Image (cartoon, grey):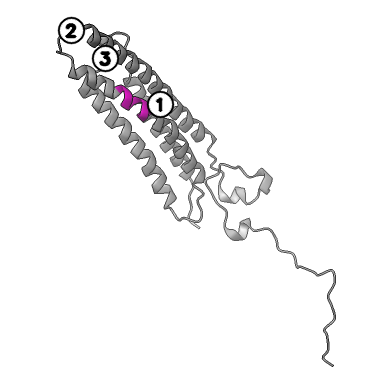
Amino acid sequence: MKDHTGRAALEQGQLYLTAQEFDRLRADISVPTTPGSLPDIVTAAQRLAILTDLIKNLSDEVLFRATDGDPGLNLAPVISAFTSAAVPAGRAVEHYTEAFHQVSFLNQFADAPHSGDLRDARQAAFHVIQERLEYVRDNLQEVVGTLRGEADRLDGTLPRILAALSRSASPANSIYRLSPEADAPAQTPIRLAYTPAPRHAR
């Protein structure tokens, strides 16, 4: 079996790094307080691209680990961390695209002649943007909390120590897997309570 000493720290580091990238995007997305503080269409598009790239990275992290056939590693806890984070990340995309559409509407009619209906439509669009970006920030905060929390719980107890622990004492979030020989319970011979005598043909 390969020596994977330090692999748990690497997995934790990747979870923390991914959380940091989502946190950085959250810091860049602010909720506008006035129409003048709205992001322009270019900035809004760039941030949407960053968000979708981050979600693609989540799926790439899962794919990389799901196809790792090393029998000494149990990467299910790490995979679960990334897939759990994908849920609020997906909601963030949904809310951001709603805000993105309203930014596009305001951009489209920025130079249109003023009218009562257009003023009301602009005001409604602004309120949608405020609401949706607030949701986006909440969703991204949930992503960050999920990734960091799962990284904190990830266990790096080495196989030789796991082998000395009882099943009940073994950590649930260890990324290491014991060999089948070490993991299998001792086999006891099976004895029948009653063994019928062989039947003789007449």
Q: Which residue is mark 2?
A: 114
Numbered disc total:
3
Depth order, front residue of 16/107: 107
Q: Residues within 10 Å of mark 2 (few under 14, many from 20)?
A: few
Amino acid at the residue labelled 2: His
Depth order, front residue of 16/92: 92
Name the residue at 59% across, 59% down: 180
Q: Residues within 10 Å of mark 3 (few under 14, many from 20)?
A: some
Amino acid at the residue labelled 1: Leu
Name the residue at 18% across, 7% down: 114
Amino acid at the residue labelled 3: Leu
What numbered label is drawn on residue 140?
A: 1
Q: Position of residue 31 (x, y in %)?
A: 34, 15
Q: Residues within 10 Å of mark 1 (few under 14, many from 20)?
A: many
Q: Position of residue 201 (x, y in %)?
A: 82, 91
Q: Secondary structure at mark 2?
A: loop
Q: Is residue 178 above or below residue 91?
A: below
What numbered label is drawn on residue 18?
A: none
Q: Which residue is mark 3?
A: 38
Q: Nearer the viewer's eye, disc 3 or disc 2?
A: 2
> Would you say 135 lies left or right of 33 here?
right
> Would you say 150 lies left or right of 90 here?
right
Q: Main secondary structure of the magenta part?
A: helix
Name the residue at 61% across, 48% down: 162
Q: Are marks 1 and 2 in contact (CB under 8 Å)?
A: no
Q: Which residues are magenta?
A: 92-99
Q: Position of residue 37 (x, y in %)?
A: 27, 11
* Residue 87 in sight: yes
Rounded to the nearest angstrom, the CA distance separating label 3 from label 1 is 19 Å
Depth order, front residue of 34/190: 34
Rounded to the nearest angstrom, the CA distance separating label 1 from label 2 is 37 Å
